[in-house]
Amino acid sequence: MANETITIVDNRTNQSYTLPIYHGTIRAMDLRQIKTGPDDFGLMTYDPAYMNTAACHSAVTYLDGDRGILRYRGYPIEQLAEHCTFLEVAYLLLYGELPNAVDLDCWSQEIMAHSLTHESVKKFMEGFNYDAHPMGILISTVAALSTFYSESRNVHDPKIRRKQIVRLIGKMPTLAAYAYRHRLGLPYVAPDPDLGYAKNYMNMLWKRLEPKYVANPVLAHALDVLFILHADHEQNCSTSTMRAVGSSNADPYSTTAAAIAALSGPLHGGANEEVLRMLAEIGSKDQIPGFIQQVKTGHRKLMGFGHRVYKNYDPRARIIKRVAEEVFEVTGRNPKIDTAIELERIALSDDYFISRKLYPNVDFYSGIIYEAMGFTPDQFTVLFGIPRTVGWLAQWQEMMEDPERKIARPRQVYTGEDKRDVVPIELRVPKTPLVLA
Ligand code: SDX
């Protein structure tokens, strides 16, 4: 488009500035030339929570929040969920193209070959209380992996980066399964590389004394689809954390542990666990109007609803609703789905939600499936973190290869005290009595 520029007139100085517009943005650094005098630092943008700030270029995932569009490397999520496996999509996110059959077979074998962990991992797994939250275990054990692979600090070596990427994707389900078995006091089950990614995870979770675990194919497929839906979502909170921590050249294990910590928050990946608690608290459909009223008066949030980007139906939630019906054919219907559907129906006809463009997001229905499959609520965010590891690593890899890459270091608007001198302690009079907890 011609004349992709913007002209700003600084009314303080009557100076005008013409700045280039770049992919619908202006470079924040172009604002620094706008000064009131030679000693002025120049203009910055103020954007808490980065509501309107693009922090990077990325070619991995495309979202259109108004139209409810999600594409990985240009492919619509609906087609990937329908036609691909999770490891196929993992390859796509990391390398930009879907693999052919030979490449997929090599890739799958490579990932499964790295599903084993160092035996010492079991020793520090034992250090956790039996009721330790699995997200706390995952954060800690993923960070600890950095101590087993000191080469991983060579983050500028593409071959070394790729090796850690494969290790992390291969080991994440094993760590998650160990945390689950530790909780139940059950012996750990070794990975079975003959099984696929999702079936092996089910094997490590649920194998008992049978010689070889046989996963229900419908449940295994459902888990694989859910992994695809959770694999990446552009610059969400945990991915932004991955980029920020990775920008200091920290190793990918420590960096991924930071991303898992961000995901654990109830406003982010922790929401799926909160949705189940909310549905359990609501109980029956007749309690829904009272709960909605609490939400509308600001006393509660409708967990699993709303999104920073989607101001339309989250396309993943639509697919998850369909997967739920397939799972219930095997597990029996989880009655919470009927409460959830009625909750959605009422919310989507209420102006509080309509005016704020609040729709179900990926977390609204996923936990209902997980519970029907036999997962406990504290495992739900782990089920988010396993596939999202691929997205975090694809974004980290993209950042490490970005020629514009620099350490992330935002500025601030200082609102504190002006310069003042220290007063001798005997002369200090507290302004307000300090109440120490
Ligand atoms: C994920 O970013 C990603 O891509 C994340 C994710 C991914 O794949 O990585 O999609 C995964 O994290 C999904 C979101 C899961 N979280 C939840 O379901 C928690 C409940 N939702 C919210 O807390 C909230 O909607 C957020 C955190 C998701 C988004 O918050 P925003 O963009 O900061 O919006 P906001 O808090 O400014 O809300 C705008 C208005 C407010 O009302 P007013 O102050 O204008 O009166 O909408 C209201 C909010 O109170 N609102 C809600 C609500 N979410 C927003 N009111 C009730 N219930 C809610 N869930």
Image (tube, helix red, strand yellow):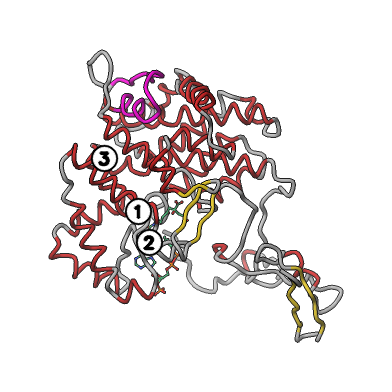
Say left or right for 320 vs 247: left
Say left or right for 124 vs 7: left
Report the quarter where the N terminus lies.
bottom right
- Name the residue at 15% across, 41% down: 332
Q: Quadrant of ligand 1?
A: bottom left
| Residue numbers of the magenta segment | 187-205
Residue 216 placement (x, y as % from top left): 25, 29
Write down the residue under mark 2. Answer: 313
Does the residue tagged 2 have its C-beta within 8 Å of any atom of ligand 1? no
- Residue neighbourhood size for the residue with mark 3, other residues' Cα within 10 Å, grouped as few (<14), some (14–19), many (≥20): some
Distance Cα–Cα, label 3 vs label 1: 20 Å
Q: Is residue 424 magenta?
A: no
| Mark 2 vs 3: CB contact within 8 A | no
- Residue neighbourhood size for the residue with mark 2, other residues' Cα within 10 Å, grouped as few (<14), some (14–19), many (≥20): many
Residue 328 placement (x, y as % from top left): 20, 42
Residue 167 placement (x, y as % from top left): 52, 27
What amino acid does circle 2 point to?
A: Tyr
Q: Secondary structure at mark 3?
A: loop
| Mark 2 vs 1: CB contact within 8 A | yes
Write down the residue under mark 1. Answer: 317
Residue 151, compared with residue 423, is above or below; it is above
Residue 80 placement (x, y as % from top left): 44, 43
Write down the residue under mark 3. Answer: 376
Q: Secondary structure at mark 1?
A: helix
- Name the residue at 30% across, 66% down: 300
